[in-house]
Image (cartoon, grey):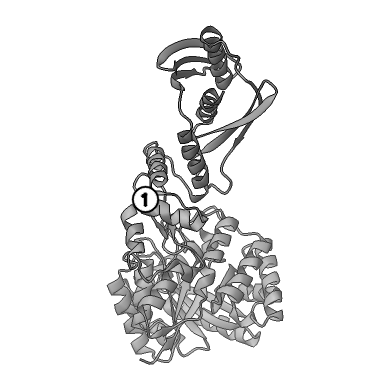
């Protein structure tokens, strides 16, 4: 099958910046533009709307000056308006060479917004294109609201295209401005247009209002579109645009006769960078780039991955510079834990694995998310607690903390089968717990409690779950120092666990 090259135009810096609440700084725009062209290797970039602000002018100047040095100037585009030449003057000042001229692609928009006749609009457009060409600026033309135009004023759309295809334009840009098309309509409309003007380059620009952006883009390519407008992370006006990462995966996996130059491996990196700069969070389940999309959670999936890769599809994380993960939680089971242990280079015997699995299930029941980084802490806690025979058990306690009152604790301790109870106040919850413990010890034991000489709390490094914290307490008894540790999702509880270990050591 002969392959057909299509152009990928990224409009994160123009339509993407129209995401509510998003504004890129000059240096962020330049950084993103470089990465899009040099690493992701998109064909073209739309970087700004003309005449928006001083900051936008500065950003375009910076990008065009970098692009001139690196031979990318022809790949940089700016959205312009039919405004009697003001956008062209702005382009000249900014050093940009390709304009995407915004015109009306439906009679409804033309009549009610511009209040002009088709003949007047065409005359203005012709003047703009000729003036741009005389200044060395190339023109692509947007037919804004084209999808509605095809539905409701087809005669106008084709009258306009008859006129436009006879002008000095590089490309005609067909937007589904309101994201209203179905995949079937997209296919029919693009086919009709491409069939009538076989030598014209048509781009499709799909908005995502019904979550049909990717499906529509796929149909547009199959129907003959020569280029696509996409944004990183699907950013853009209202519900955004068709997202770059999903569309690239779809083209590579399902449209085998279509050739694109985009480098899949760079998709994740640029998604993260744009997320950081824009503050627009990537949903964790966003295909290809979401945090969870390569994580197997159910134990049965991890088990199947061990048995002839039963749960793998073509979307292998390595294609996008990512790694498969196995979640740890109440549904994860032994196979998931084994996968994580392998990654960490830790081996456990069956009995140990059973205990660690049990602890992870208990944490899962408390709605805690356990990460791979938490695992060594859980192992040391579970196995460590297990080797100590429990003579003393901290059986029950109430920790009281109320505004305007001193923290207090009621504690029930079981020592060699007998239960004792005490109540005490303290400067904090753990201090109150220790005071209650001291009371019991004084009453029922001939021995002194060790003094607490250091108390440290840490969250497992690299853990993004905040699920666990470890309390490490240094004790001193008769000139000898020793350390105990406790692990729990609650800081005071982890300190109490470390204290219970101490009670069983002394
Ligand atoms: C700039 C215009 C063409 C646009 O983004 C749209 O119509 O979706």
Which quadrant of the view contains residue 180?
Answer: bottom left
Q: Which residue: 66% across, 70% down? A: 60
Compare residues 37 and 359 and report the one nearer the observer.
359
Q: Which residue: 61% across, 67% down? A: 32
Quadrant in the picture for the C terminus: top right
Which quadrant of the view contains residue 78?
Answer: bottom right
Q: Residue furthest left?
A: 184
Compare residues 505 and 95 and report the one nearer the observer.
505
Compare residues 36 and 463 and report the one nearer the observer.
463
Q: Is residue 455 above or below residue 449?
A: below
Compare residues 77 and 85 and report the one nearer the observer.
77
Quadrant in the picture for the N terminus: bottom left
Q: Which residue: 45% across, 49% down? A: 348
Q: Is residue 64 left or right of residue 426?
A: right
- Counting every numbered tag in the picture gives 1
Name the residue beneath numbered marker 1: 334
In terms of secondary structure, where does tag 1 sit? helix
Q: Is residue 84 visible?
A: no
Q: Position of residue 117 (x, y in %)?
A: 43, 75
Q: Residue furthest top?
A: 443
Q: Position of residue 223 (x, y in %)?
A: 34, 82
Q: Is residue 165 above or below residue 467?
A: below
Mark 1 C-beta to ligand 1 under 8 Å: no
Q: Which residue: 52% across, 49% down? A: 373
Q: Is residue 442 above or below residue 35?
A: above
Q: Position of residue 128 (x, y in %)?
A: 57, 80
Bin the neighbour count of mark 1 within 10 Å (Cα to Cα): few under 14, some 14-19, many 20 and up.
Answer: many
Q: Is residue 112 visible?
A: yes
């Amino acid at each position: 099958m002969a392959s057909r090259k299509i152009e990928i135009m990224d409009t994160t810096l123009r339509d993407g910046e129209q995401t509510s609440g998003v504004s890129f700084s000059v240096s962020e725009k330049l950084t993103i533009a470089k990465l899009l062209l040099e690493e992701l290797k998109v064909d073209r970039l739309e970087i700004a709307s003309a005449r928006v602000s001083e900051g936008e002018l500065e950003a375009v100047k910076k990008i065009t000056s970098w692009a001139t040095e690196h031979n990318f100037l022809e790949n940089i585009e700016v959205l312009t308006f039919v405004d009697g030449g003001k956008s062209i003057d702005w382009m000249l000042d900014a050093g940009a060479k390709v304009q995407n001229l915004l015109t009306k692609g439906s009679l409804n928009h033309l009549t009610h917004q511009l209040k002009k006749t088709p003949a007047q609009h065409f005359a203005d457009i012709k003047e703009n294109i000729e003036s741009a060409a005389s200044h060395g600026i190339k023109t692509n033309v947007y037919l804004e609201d084209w999808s509605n135009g095809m539905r409701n004023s087809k005669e106008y759309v084709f009258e306009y295209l008859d006129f436009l295809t006879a002008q000095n334009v590089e490309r005609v840009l067909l937007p589904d401005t309101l994201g209203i098309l179905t995949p079937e309509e997209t296919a029919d409309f693009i086919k009709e247009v491409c069939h009538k003007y076989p030598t014209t380059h048509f781009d499709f620009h799909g908005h995502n209002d019904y979550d049909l952006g990717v499906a529509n883009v796929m149909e547009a390519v199959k129907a003959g579109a020569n280029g696509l407008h996409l944004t990183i992370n699907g950013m853009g006006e209202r519900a955004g645009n068709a997202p770059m990462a999903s569309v690239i995966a779809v083209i590579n996996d399902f449209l085998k006769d279509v050739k694109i130059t985009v480098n899949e491996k760079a998709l994740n990196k640029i998604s993260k960078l744009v997320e950081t700069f824009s503050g627009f969070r990537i949903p964790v389940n966003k295909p290809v780039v979401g945090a969870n999309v390569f994580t197997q959670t159910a134990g049965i999936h991890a088990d199947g991955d061990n048995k002839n890769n039963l749960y793998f599809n073509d979307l292998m994380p390595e294609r996008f510079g990512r790694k498969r993960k196995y979640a740890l939680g109440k549904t994860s089971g032994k196979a998931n834990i084994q996968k994580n242990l392998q990654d960490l280079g830790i081996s456990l015997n069956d009995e140990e694995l059973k205990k660690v699995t049990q602890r992870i299930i208990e944490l899962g029941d408390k709605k805690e998310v356990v990460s791979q980084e938490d695992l060594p802490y859980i192992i040391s806690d579970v196995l460590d607690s297990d080797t100590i025979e429990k003579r003393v058990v901290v059986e029950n306690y109430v920790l009281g903390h109320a505004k305007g009152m001193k923290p207090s604790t009621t504690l029930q301790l079981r020592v060699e089968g007998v239960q004792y109870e005490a109540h005490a106040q303290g400067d904090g919850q753990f201090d109150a717990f220790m005071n209650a413990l001291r009371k019991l010890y004084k009453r029922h034991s001939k021995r002194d409690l060790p003094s607490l000489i250091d108390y440290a709390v840490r969250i497992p490094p690299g853990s993004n779950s905040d699920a666990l914290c470890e309390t490490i307490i240094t004790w001193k008894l008769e000139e000898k120092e020793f350390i105990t540790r406790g692990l729990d999702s609650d800081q005071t509880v982890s300190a109490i666990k470390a204290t219970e270990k101490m009670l069983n050591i002394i």
